[in-house]
Image (spheres, rainbow, N blue to C red):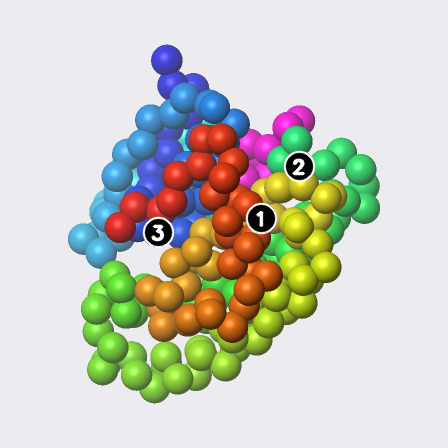
Amino acid sequence: MAMYRVHGMRASGNCHKVGLLLDLLGEPYEWVETDVTKGATRTPAFLAMNPNGKVPVLEIGPGQYLAESNAILHYLAEGTPFLPADRLDHARVLQWMFFEQYSHEPYIATSRYWLHILKEPEKYRARLEECRPRGLAALGVMERHLAAADWFAAGRCTIADIALHAYTHVAHEGGFDLASFPAVRRWLERLSALPGYRPMAA
C-alpha cells in the first residue's frame, strides 16, 4: 500500500524531483496527475492542500500536506543516505538546493516552460533572451564544481543532485545546449545509472 500520494504534473521538473527521490528510495507512492495548464491547481480542493496553488504537493496522511519541491525532498530524505547527517555536508546540500531555486530554476525551467509546455517561443522571445545568459551562468557554476567532484555534496548523490538534475537533464527543451558542459553531462550519466532512476515524462 502506498504511504504517500503525490499531486503533481509529470512534465514538471519540480514534481519530477519528488517522484525520482521516491523511486530511488524504493518507496511506494500514488501519483495524482495535476495539470497546471488546465487550472487543476486553482480548484477549491487543491487550494485546501496548498493555498499557493502550485504543484507538487505531498500528501503524507489525512489532512497532512507538504508543498514546495525542495522542502518535500528534505522531508523524504531525512534519515537516508540522500541527506547527510554531518552538519557541514547537510548545509552544503541546502546551499546547492537554494542555488537551484534562485540561480538555476528561474531561467532554465521557465525557458523550458515557455518553449516546451506552452510552445509559445514568439510570445516569450524577449523573456527567453533575458533568461539565456543567466541560465548559462548557472550551468557554468555547475560545470566548474563538477569538473573537480562527482557530486554536489558529501561525495555521493544527495537531494542536491536530485534537485539540480530535474531541469538540467531537460535543459535542451528550454534552448540550453549542454555540449559545452562535459562535466555536467558526465554527472547526468552517473545519476541516470542509479538503481530506480527514471527520466522525466515527455
Residue type highlighted by circle 1: Asp
Q: Quadrant of residue 199?
A: top left
Along the line of sight, which residue is nearer the eye, 52 or 13? 13
Residue type highlighted by circle 3: Ser
The quarter of the image holding the N terminus is top left
Where residue 158 sits: x, y (%)? 62, 41
The residue beneath circle 3 is 12
Q: Which residue does the image show at 59% across and 61% down from the upper left?
A: 183
Where residue 155 sits: x, y (%)? 72, 44
Residue type highlighted by circle 2: Leu
Mark closer to the chain start, 1 or 2: 2
Q: CA distance from mark 1 to mark 2?
A: 11 Å
Residue 2: assigned label: none
Where residue 173 sits: x, y (%)? 33, 64
Mark closer to the chain start, 3 or 2: 3
Q: Which residue does the image show at 52% across and 36% down from the upper left?
A: 194
The residue beneath circle 1 is 161
Mark closer to the chain start, 3 or 1: 3
Q: Which stretch is magenta?
A: 73-80
Q: Is residue 80 above or below residue 104?
A: above
The magenta stretch spans residue 116: no
The residue beneath circle 2 is 83
